[in-house]
Image: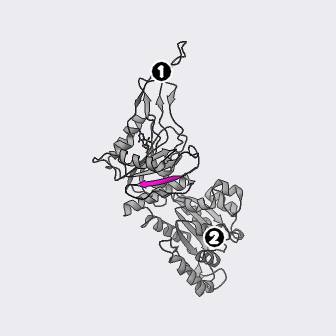
Amino acid sequence: MTQAPLSGRKILLIVGGGIAAYKALELVRLLKKAGSEVRTVLTAAGAEFVTPMSLAALTGQPVRQDLFLPEDETAMGHIELSRWADLVVVAPATAGLIAKAANGLADDLASTTLLATDKRVLLAPAMNVRMWEHPAVRANVERLKGFDGFHGAAVVGPDEGEMACGEFGPGRMAEPAAILAAIEGLLAGPGGRPLAERHAVVTAGPTFEPIDPVRGLTNRSSGKQGYAIAEALAALGAKVTLVSGPVALAAPAGVERVWVETAREMQAAVDAALNSEDGAADIAVMSAAVADWRVDGVASGKIKKAPGGPPSLSLIENPDILAGVSAAGKTRPKLVVGFAAETTDLEANARAKLSRKGCDWIVGNDVSEAVFGEESNTVTLFTRGGEAERWPRQSKAEVARKLAARIADHFRA
Ligand code: C5P
């Protein structure tokens, strides 16, 4: 699937304090035009040069300025914000911000975000030429670049020319178009879209098994975890088909959603996606809460309350979609991931499910704590022959990103 490199990508822009901050507004405009989603952090010094209002108007998002603001933290915590991004861009990157990041100093929102992010950081330095040439600044920049493997920073600019302070030399912030090109390069380059060319099929939500035209059997799955997984896989470049039961969620950008209601419809949609004209899928993540049973002989009209007492329902077993997808065959995806929601003996039950269903990984989900409809989740990843990986309780979006990153590593290996 070819896609514009910035379409649907998430950029967190940190605007530092410098006269070049006005160019950050143009950068936001270019990023938005290229189809990316932009959120901004404005430092206290940055706010001396551009107003939060202009950034909010251009991004269509609230601007984050404070580390300790309950309203901001309830909308999206600062750690979450640093992970939400596909790339963090600092423009202008002042000598002060660079020094903080290079030394792990975290005393405001921008520096804390730079320390907390698990994504690459692009710096667009802007400062007086003497400052830029100072060995302390050079050393800090080299240090940041060298944190490779730990998300080493990339640097664009600075340009040479006449500076606002009247001196001449390197120190002017790179032009917005050049920063945009650097962003595109980083997101398209190795590591940017590790799942490009991969096709993933994800199931999500509950199924609904009709009893009669107005009633049915269903469950409390909200679909949030599966939708987040579809979104995270798409963010890493995968072509994603999301086969969804009835939920009240918007389809993530760039994801093809197929609505289904019953388990058998879900199975048919999954089969169709696995045998699509672009060939077999590479990845299947079956997170749907498929009803185990359906009603045998769905009534064609509404069943009436009758004096003889309630009707009895006869149930028959639904097909196991995960087991079917996992069965060897030419359309078996290279990686099949199932879910196991358990209230007791998570490890034993998840491992048993791994072999019974024939899938490669199981995401074990402890549902003894509140999970359905919640924003966060506690999961353990079980792989064949591997140690159980217990992940701390974290947001469903974070679980999804971590799982997508593990999937990308699996294909890289
Ligand atoms: O057997 P159990 O329902 O606990 O297994 C859960 C896993 O199997 C989940 O990945 C779920 O999506 C999948 N499943 C399925 N089809 C079914 C039942 C479960 O794909 N009929």
Three-letter amino acid code at the position of disc 2: Ser
Residue 165 in sight here: yes
Three-letter amino acid code at the position of disc 1: Ser
* Nearer to us in this view, 242 or 17: 242
Q: Where on the picture, by quarter, is residue 50? A: bottom right
Residue 7 in sight here: no
* Image point (52%, 54%), residue name: 399
Mark 2 or 1: in front is 1
Ligand 1 closer than 8 Å to label 2 CB: no
What residue range appears in magenta?
Answer: 370-382
The residue identified by callout 1 is: 312
Q: Which mark is residue 111?
A: 2
- Residue 409 in the image: x percent, y percent? 41, 62
Secondary structure under badge 2?
helix
396, above or below 39, in the image: above
Q: Where on the picture, by quarter, is residue 52? A: bottom right
Question: How far is disc 2 from disc 1 in space, using C-alphas?
Answer: 63 Å
* Nearer to us in this view, 364 or 399: 364
Q: Is residue 377 magenta?
A: yes
374, above or below 207, in the image: below
